[in-house]
Amino acid sequence: MDEPKGTGQPSTWWSRPRRAAEGRTATGAEPPAASEAAGAADAPCEPLHGVDPYATPPYGEPGPWAPAPPVQRPAVTPPRGVPLPGATPAHGTPLPSATPPHGVPAPSVTPPRGIPAPALPAQQGAGSSPVTPSDSAPAPSHKDSHKDAAPPHGTLPHGVPVPAATPPHGVRVPGQGTAAGGAGEWPGGRGYAFQQPVPGPAARPPRTPSRLSRLAVGACALALVAGVAGGLIGAYVERHGQVTDIELPQAGADPAADGGPRPKGSIAGIARRALPGVVTLHARGGGSEATGTGFVLDRRGHILTNNHVVESAKGADAVRVTFSSGQTATGRVVGSDSGYDLAVVEVSGVSGLRPLPLGDSDAVRVGDPVVAIGAPYDLDGTVTTGIISAKERPITAGGEEPGSEMSYVDALQTDAPINPGNSGGPLMDGRGRVIGVNSAIKAAGSGSALPDGKSGGSIGLGFAIPVNQARRVAEELINDGRATHPVIGVTLDMEYRGEGARIGGSGGGGEAVAKGGPADEAGLAEGDVITRVNGKAVADGEELIVRVRSHRPGDRLELVVRRGGAGGAERSVSLTLGSASG
């Protein structure tokens, strides 16, 4: 098949790549001195056939600096193995682009910036006119050519055109073939390929943060905020135990809450009803002041208390009375009895008095619950509870001070705490009724009961005057100003250490048996020993006095009397109690 005109060479080199022959001109003349040196260096790589005068020099080597002759536009090189057409297409006919197969590197790659582009070889064929790469696009100016690719050997002679380093987009470069086989084999060397334009030194656009950068910055900011928030929450939790405020659980509404009614038999119910009738007393006189408790007997303003609470009061306004409501008043002592350790104080001009109901002390049984109310150590309105520990406990209190009289009480014993200041306060049963008047306690280390105002504190042994006895004495003090004592008309030997109470003897004073008295009428004589009263044993003279004073004058007693000492015969004697005042 015919070859394209002007080539004079086969379309394919099968032996080795082109090197030296590509550096020759179209007339066969040798290139300049620099080209000669390059050709001499590449002499061992001569092709097996004749030199192609229109071949493109290897990439990266400078071409001859000569005016570009007219270029013949050859036909597009067909794929390998396809016969070449015999005619060259007319000038101006567009040629299809020959794109190398996928994976084969495209020839005529634009050299990196700063490396000079090779000169286009001159070629002229029959019937063609001179064509330069500027036919399709305006040629760059001489000034621009120097900016893009400066010649390696200095400035060209005057009048010689300088080829553009990079042809305009779309201009085909002669001598560039398409890939027909493996990398490095190029058919013919006369094909055309598009060159990629080299971007000029345009100004770099301002860099904007990429989306990944913005995400990274946002993640860092979020981590910082989370760290600060976590630290604050951790500090709050460390201080308070948890994130939120603490709310403690609470029981639901109680119908009896907020001062509502309590069962009558409960401690709270008893205290609620009794407190308005309990008062605190302060007695002044003789350079001293005593504090105790009392309770209201009636609406006329009579208050019952212990004698040892008000015995120091001197003057009309020596007693100050304070009610549970905070109201205060001045009281006066209307009567007292040191033998029973009881006294009555009267206040006037006070309205709304709440008297406490009185119970029956004879009906009390050991183990019954009791409530004591008073002002221990001047703490008014104090409520304590306990039980009845014993009944008819004979105690004596007082008499330590010169001129003071001993008190004899057939007392109720309780373990409800009673302390200094409780004296004269009520001891109440489970129904809220007064069954006793708190009067004395057993102090540690003491051999007898003491008024609670003179002791160190409760050890669980408290004593109260039975209310049946206190009621009788209070009525006499209010009505007569003085109380009566039951008597049998004998003088007792208080030094006797045997069993029972002996009449007369060395320890007695005055007549052993009063003439015309109850004992005289019953036939008792000096030296007799009374061992029982109403069936209860008597240990000594103090206990006999307690048993007698627990009754009213006029009551009848049954006595067991032993005559003639320890070995004498015993007999029963009945007598009626007499009365003595003061």
Image (cartoon, rainbow, N blue to C red):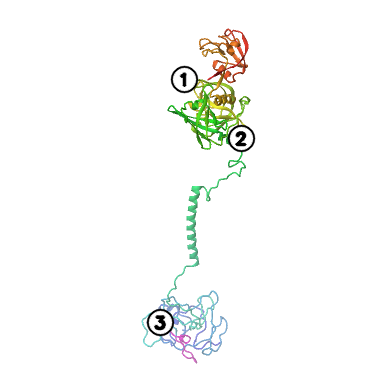
Residue range corresponding to the magenta coloring: 122-140
Residue on which disc 2 sits: 266
Give the left or right position of residue 458, taking residue 27 as reference. right
Q: Residues within 10 Å of mark 1 (few under 14, many from 20)?
A: few
Q: Is residue 481 above or below residue 527?
A: below
Dot placed on the residue nearer the N-terminal end, 3 or 1: 3
Residue 480 position, x and y percent, is: 55, 24
**Pointer 2 or 3: first along the chain:** 3
Residue 363 falls left or right of residue 9: right
Query: Is 137 one of the magenta-colored residues?
Result: yes
Q: Residue at x 59, y 19 (%)?
A: 553
Amino acid at circle 2: Ser
- Is there any visible trace of residue 345 in the rendered image? yes
Disc 1 residue type (three-letter)? Gly
Residue 403: numbered disc: 1
Residue under label 3 = 144
